[in-house]
Image (spheres, coloured by chain):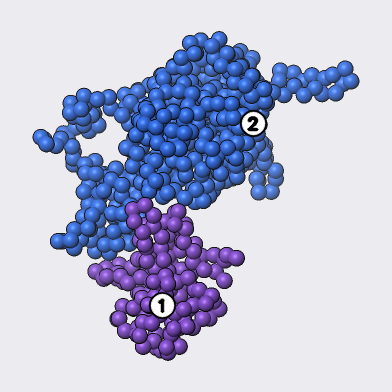
Chain colours: A purple, B blue
Amino acid sequence: MKRVFVNEKWCLGCHLCEYNCAFANSGVDDMVKALKGKQINPRIQVEGDNNINFAVSCRHCAEPLCVKGCITGALSVKDGVINLDSEKCVGCFTCVVSCPYGAIMPGDNGKVAQKCELCLNNSCGEPACVTGCPNNAIVYEERG
Amino acid sequence: MGIDLFYPEYEIVRDQNRCIACRVCERQCANEVHHYDNDLNLMVSDTSKCVACHRCVSLCPTRALKVVKSDNTFRENKNWTHDKITEIFKQAQTGGVLLASMGNPQDFPIYWDKILINASQVTNPSIDPLREPMETKVFLGKKPDKVERDENGQLVDNLPPQLELSIPIMFSAMSYGSISYNAHESLARAATALGTYYNTGEGGLHEDFYKYGPNTIVQVASGRFGVYKDYLETGAAIEIKMGQGAKPGIGGHLPGEKIVGDISKTRMIPEGTDAISPAPHHDIYSIEDLHQLVHSLKEATEYKKPVIVKIAAVHNVAAIASGVARSGADIIAIDGFRGGTGAAPTRTRDNVGIPIELALAAVDKRLRDEGIRNHVSIVVGGSIRCSSDVVKAIALGADAVYIATSALVALGCHLCRTCGTGKCNWGIATQKPELVKRLNPDIGCEHLVNLLTAWNREIKEIMGGMGINSIEALKGNRLMLRGIGLNEKELEILGIKHAGE
């Protein structure tokens, strides 16, 4: 299955992926309308310092601790992609504390969690962080 | 601080209605133009630091930024222009020699734009390159005077070493040091993929790039940086740099602060020492001296590699080229006054040298008149900007062309002409690791391959239109060219007729 991989060698720490992510998941068709004046809460986050940067998003683990810990069955694995059903999520945030990568976080309203679903469930169709990366530091590919 | 005499030449215009304060512009500007103002809750820009490199404009996700030329103006006239006035201000404040980057920007004629290309109509058929074969392969090097046969009538292989190019375009010399590791890797990989050559420049060859040797031209310049046996043996050809179009008669100077780590190792000089290339080669004061160096290099590489001698296009270039041809060189590279540079004295860049079009026409004619045109191939550079420039250069007599500025533009360069600051926001003319990594060679190589593939398609299309199916048949075919708006003397030097004749 194709996953999002990050090559820290080419990550510039520009944070464009965060904004592209926030826009892609906003449901709004214009980036200015979607993000102007708002604090973004993206599902991918750039970590690092002045020397090295890398973007972190859900790894879609083969044995995901978040899914194991989910008390309501809101998190499920479908075709290798870990999806979150916000209708079922009760906001206990067990997943948030159990994810070793810090890749799940409370959503905008603070009541349910949110995570990267590879832009398969929004209007993008392919990961917006990947298509918007100016230096090919984030790639969406099959790896053995 | 005194009086600030300078008003910024460029202004950043930010559409605050579109700016989402993502701060990408701030993070991407090495000149620290942009910052977020916590009191105003807005992004603000200090226009005075902007070099118009367009990094922020290109990366702004909402198109909220643009760079415009300032309309602040002196009471200038044709004699006292903005540039002349500000240059005096600068020198009055610093007492220094003015430095500038890239090629001659002055309003001299660009002959490429005053030459028109022919096409077939009725009496000779044009060729469709999509349906019929079209040859863009060329061989560079000395060609034998005659066909020789042995006592059995078999052909004797008397062909001196040649460079084989799939397209008549090579990447010209840019040293590691003046441009970044990633820029070099992009060029090396692209040259390999395209079946052509790139040139190390005078800074030696990084050990990681020895594997691209078959597509590398190694340069020997007056500083002799990084020159040793393996270096010479690795390259497909050796180029002796006598001059550079942007600064004929001038040497080079890479400041000590740029001689760090791998650059120091590759150039084989201690860290922190200035890399000074003398204006002349201190062992070359005549054609005979050049002959010695050409043959020393051939001896060192067992006569297996062609030797290129690169000269700047200056007033008596034809006579110089004739001498170079007789020195044993296999290829002459001529660099016109619009050729780029990381840094040159402004006065030299703007006033020294001649256009490559005239130099090429003069050299080709001179060598033909003297019956030695086949002793050398001619490669020209110094602002080849597009495929039609390539076609015109070949029809004027060139065997191939060198491009460098066009290649850098393909890598992202916006010709902001501040290479000397070492703060290239596009990761090209810099050695700062955080800037160098902005140029991912995967992307750089792809862009270069795309550019030359596109040019090659256009060259085939234009040749087909003329009814010509190989570069070989176009070479020196000046009947395919006509001048427009040129005077008798210019036409005579270019060896072409005026449009309508």
Q: Residue at x 25, y 31 (%)?
A: B83
Using the rendered image of the protein, determine whether residue B389 is visible from the camera's viewpoint.
no
Asked whether disc 2 touches disc 1, contact meaning CB atoms under 8 Å apart, the reply is no
Q: Which label lies toward us, 2 or 1?
A: 1
Callout 2: residue from which chain? B
Q: Which image quarter: residue A97? A: bottom left
Q: Residue at x 42, y 89 (%)?
A: A72
Q: Secondary structure at mark 1?
A: helix
Rendered location of residue B78, percent (x, y): 23, 29
Give the labeled residue for mark 1.
Answer: A98
Q: Which is more toward the observer, A16 or A92?
A: A92
Q: Where residue B163 is drawn, which disc sits there?
A: 2
- Most distant residue in the right direction: B152
Rendered location of residue B19, percent (x, y): 27, 62
Q: Check disc 2: other Cα within 10 Å, few if <14, some if 14-19, many if 20+.
A: some
- The CA distance from mark 2 to mark 1 is 62 Å
